[in-house]
Amino acid sequence: VVIGVHVKKVVPYTKVSMGEFGQVDISLAAIDAVVGKVAKSFEGIRDVKTRIKSDNAGISVLLDVVMNADCNIPETIALLQQDVKAQLETTVGISVVSVKTAITNIAAVQ
């Protein structure tokens, strides 16, 4: 006898707004895609991994970033954080509490 159990994968969501006609939610994967698009616009950033924490005040974005060795890291990261916050608040309409960044590696320029 073979018994199979299908577990439906739950995609985590966060609330964007509550309007007259109901609630608007967005998946954390969609937020990750927006952050990835912003990060790809920076020449000095090689790779970004996103972690998102959600609560009633909004979301906190934690970025693990791999940078190129030839860029100005403090300036690039400050602009990245500013652009991520602005893009999420403008495009998605979600409140961003913070954007924290950890430089996980410095990649050699090829």
Image (tube, helix red, strand yellow):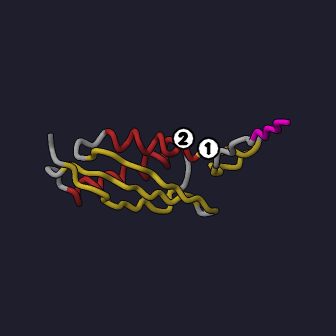
| Residue 38, magenta (yes or no) | no
Contact between marks 2 and 1 (CB within 8 A): the answer is yes
Compared across the picture, whether 5 is left or right of 61 comes to right
Indicate the position of residue 89 as horizontal and vertical percent values: 49, 49
Residue 68 is marked as none
Indicate the position of residue 25 as horizontal and vertical percent values: 66, 45
Label 2 sits on what residue type?
Ala
Secondary structure at badge 2 equals helix
Nearest the camera: 68 or 21?
Answer: 68
Establish if 99 lies above or below 83: below
Location of the N terminus (image quadrant):
top right
Q: Residues within 10 Å of mark 1 (few under 14, many from 20)?
A: some
Which residue in the protein does label 2 denote? 30
Which residue in the protein does label 1 denote? 26
Indicate the position of residue 77 as horizontal and vertical percent values: 29, 56
Which corner quadrant of the image does residue 72 belong to?
A: bottom left
Magenta span: chief secondary structure: loop
Secondary structure at badge 1 equals strand
Residue at 52% x, 55% y is 52
Label 1 sits on what residue type?
Ile
Which corner quadrant of the image does residue 100 belong to?
A: bottom left
Residue at 28% x, 44% y is 46
The magenta-colored residue range is: 1-6
The CA distance from mark 2 to mark 1 is: 7 Å
Q: Residues within 10 Å of mark 2 (few under 14, many from 20)?
A: few
Q: How many marks?
A: 2
Residue at 33% x, 53% y is 65
Indicate the position of residue 80 as horizontal and vertical percent values: 33, 51
